[in-house]
Structure formats: structure tokens, C-alpha cells
Image (cartoon, rainbow, N blue to C red):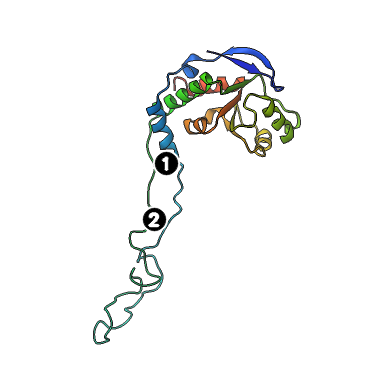
Amino acid sequence: MKVQVYNQEGEKFKEVALPSAVFDIPWNADLVHQVVTSQQANRRVVRANTKGRGEVSGGGKKPWAQKHTGRARHGSIRSPLWKGGGVTFGPTKERVFTKKINKKMRIGALFALLSAKARENALVVLDILEVAGRKTKTLRGMFTKLPSDTRPTLLILPSMERNLISAVGNIPFVQTIQAKDLNALDVATYQYLVLPQKSIEVIEKTFHKT
């Protein structure tokens, strides 16, 4: 499959052939759904947490005698029946949402999504990505000249470039990721993928035949 390569001015520069083993994979909706939902579950952070009767403070002694008071029997103010007592069947941090997915399935879903982006012309390949000064204003202007314009975009970098990542971080519709860390969830989340030609080489080297 061949795609158009753009320069930083948004002009068509040339055509490049994409590796068929990565960008020409049939769509597999079931596989993509299984991998994406598992990644969403693995990223889930458990925040809701309640204390049981063994975790709340107080209740070191019996509130009152068992008999002859005329009141109901109670053994501890930690009881869920009491205000400030433990919570029965409440959510806890011990819940585990992690789902295991094997490597072959993760890579298969990633390739299926990359191939779909290429077929839908949602894959924007840059000749090079070199912006003097790494200025946010300059980078924003570059993105508006590309087919992705201001739509949700994932910028795939061939390596760690801290200054560039910092500058892009101020552009609300663009997120960055290194090619070696590419995954199905991030690819599925963004409407467009923008990547320099070097990133294609890193993707093929990292994920193909691994």
C-alpha cells in the first residue's frame, strides 16, 4: 500500500510504500474490541474505597452492659448499624479489573487498526519533523496545514524528544507517543495518526516478528 508523504508546509512531497505486514492487515472487529477493552480495564484506577468494621476507629469496649439496660444489645460502635461504623458490602481498593491479553493478540489488534487508518486516509506521513525552536505556535500552524487539521491527532515520534513533546503538550488536539510504545487503545482513540517516516521503521522493527 502506498500513501502520500507531506512536508511540514502541508504540501504533497512524494509517495511511500508502507510495509504490508503492518499496514495491510484485514479488519478484525472482535480482536480489536477484546484488546481495547482489556487495555481500558488495565488502565482503570480504583478510587472508591470504604472501611469495614475492622478499619474504622473506636469501639475498644462494649458500649453498655449486655442486660438490664432496657436497650438493644451491642458489642461495638464499629458495627455497621452505628453512625461512623463500618460499611457493609461497600466498594474497596481490593477490586481487580486487570485483564490478561497475550502479545500476539495485542500486536494483531494494533496492526488491524493501523491498516484501517491507512485505508481511511487517516494516516498522515511526514517527510521529516524538524521545527526550529520547538515553538508551540509553529507546531500548531504545521498541524493545521496537514489533512488532520485540528481534529484529534496522535503524533507518533521515532524517539524521545523532550522539547518537542513539551511544545506539543500545549496543543489541545494533539497527543504524543513514541513509536515503540504504540498500542491499540491509543490508535483507536484518535481520529488521525501523524508520524515521520522514521517512525514507520521503528514500528516495523519493534512489533513485526516479535
Which residue is located at x 70 percent, y 32 percent?
Answer: 140
Q: Position of residue 174 (x, y in %)?
A: 62, 34
First along the sequence among labels 1 and 2: 1
Q: Nearer the viewer, residue 184 or 145?
A: 145
Helix, strand or loop under label 1: helix
Instruction: Please give left or right for residue 162 compared with residue 28 in the image.
Output: right
Q: Position of residue 114 (x, y in %)?
A: 50, 23
In this figure, which residue is indicated by the disc labeled 1? Answer: 41
Q: Position of residue 124 (x, y in %)?
A: 60, 22
In this figure, which residue is indicated by the disc labeled 2? Answer: 92
Mark 1 packing: few (<14 Cα in 10 Å), some, or many (20+)? some
Marks 1 and 2 sit apart, C-alpha to C-alpha, by 16 Å
Q: Amino acid at mark 2?
A: Thr
The quadrant where residue 104 appears: top left
Q: Which mark is residue 188?
A: none
Marks 1 & 2, CB-CB < 8 Å contact: no
